[in-house]
Each structure stands twice: as structure tokens, then as C-alpha cells.
Image (cartoon, grey):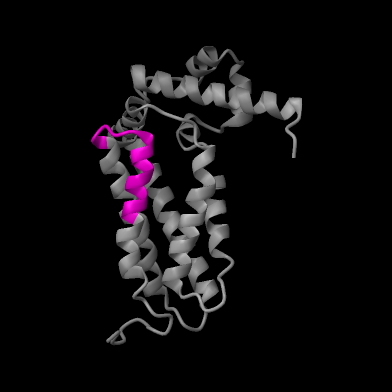
Amino acid sequence: MEESRRDRKKRLTRQRIIAAAMRLFAEQGYEQTTVTQIAVAADVDPKTFFNYFGAKDEVVFADTEHIFDRLLGELAAPRPQEGPGELLTRAVQEYAARRRPEVPRKEPEELSAGVRLMMTTPALQAKGLYLMLDLQRRMAGELLKAFPDRLDPITAAAMTGALIGAVQQASLASVELGRSQDELWRAARHGLDIAARGLLSVRADIAEGSDPS
């Protein structure tokens, strides 16, 4: 669908607010930056800021809910004869393939700055942790929906935690090493591959407390 002029203007305004906020957060700190300062830097009225974001922390996690919904949507359509590990692995792979072309290019310094902001700001650390835990809980729920009679809640939770943890930590290590955005994607895929080796061994008929041998 072709983007209308109005939608394009809104999208560009939103991007400008995000860019201005992230620049100010990096330059003077998250806590020290006000919404008014962000609005001035983005050349918008403070009221306009609140048309797009409810608070400044939402800027850091822009599009998170939309991203999560797309990932969860991938889990909602298991294929015939597909096991839980296969579904979970494929869903993340297909999500990443669709998401990657949409992500703006960033230099290693920009990637590092974003990670430093997240890791050194308590409020952002707390929100980031909550969002990731919530994602894992929701992913586990989708797995249980896909395999209602053959997968138990503990196994589903362990599977999603293993996968998300592997991808997240591999990605974080890549950024901390100062590597490029392409290398970041490869690191995430490597984390996925490592986790998948264990995930694919989970059979849909293994229940909590049973002997998997």
C-alpha cells in the first residue's frame, strides 16, 4: 500500500523525535534530558511529542510492542508435523528475515551508545527486563496454544527462555566488542543456532518431570 503524504509526515516526525531524543540521551544522560528539550531538538511542540509517545522511556523502546506482535504472530501458525522446537526456531528465523530490511543502518558507535544507555540507566534496565520477560511469557503461551495437549508450561517457558537468552546475549556481546550491524545480525543468528540444537531435541510429548530418555 502506497504511503500517503500525511502518513509519511507523521512517520518522519516520529523518526525525528526518536533521533533527537537518543542524541540528547547520549550527550547529557537520560535522567537529565527533558521532554521539552527533546521537542526543541526535534523542532516540534512538546504537545506533539505526546501525540507520539506517552513518556520519554517509550522513545527508547519505540515499536517494541509492534515488533513483539509480529514475532508472536509467527508462532500462531504451526506447520503440519512441526514440533515445538521447530516452530519456535522457524518463527524467530522468519521474523528476523522480515525485520532486518526495516532496521535503519547504524554505525558500531551508535549501537554501543544505545547499549550503554540501556545498561547504565536503572529505569531503562528495569523496563527492558520487564519487556523481555513479558515477551518470553507470551511466546511460551503461544507454544502452549500450538501444542495444547502435548507441551507443558514449564517446558514451554524453558524453551523460550533458552532461545531469547541465547540471541540476546550473543547480540550484546557483539555490540560490546564494537562490531558492525551486519556482524550483530550474524551473532544473533549464531545464538539462535546454538539454542536450536537443544530446542529441537524437545519432543512435544515430554511433560514436566518426565524422563526424556
Does 203 sit left or right of 148 as displayed?
Answer: left
Q: Quadrant of the N terminus?
A: top right
Residue at the left extreme of this rendering:
177
| Rendered residue at 35%/17% (across/down) | 27
Q: Nearer the viewer, residue 118 or 88?
A: 88
| Rendered residue at 28%/40% (across/down) | 174
Can residue 140 be seen here?
no
State the extent of the magenta-drawn residues as a range. 176-191
| Rendered residue at 44%/79% (across/down) | 151
Residue 180 image offset from top left, x and y in percent: 33, 33
| Rendered residue at 35%/48% (across/down) | 188
Residue 90 image offset from top left, x and y in percent: 47, 62
Q: How many marks?
A: 0
Q: Nearer the viewer, residue 180 or 139?
A: 180
Can residue 111 be seen here?
yes
Residue 117 image offset from top left, x and y in percent: 33, 30
Q: Nearer the viewer, residue 54 or 87?
A: 87
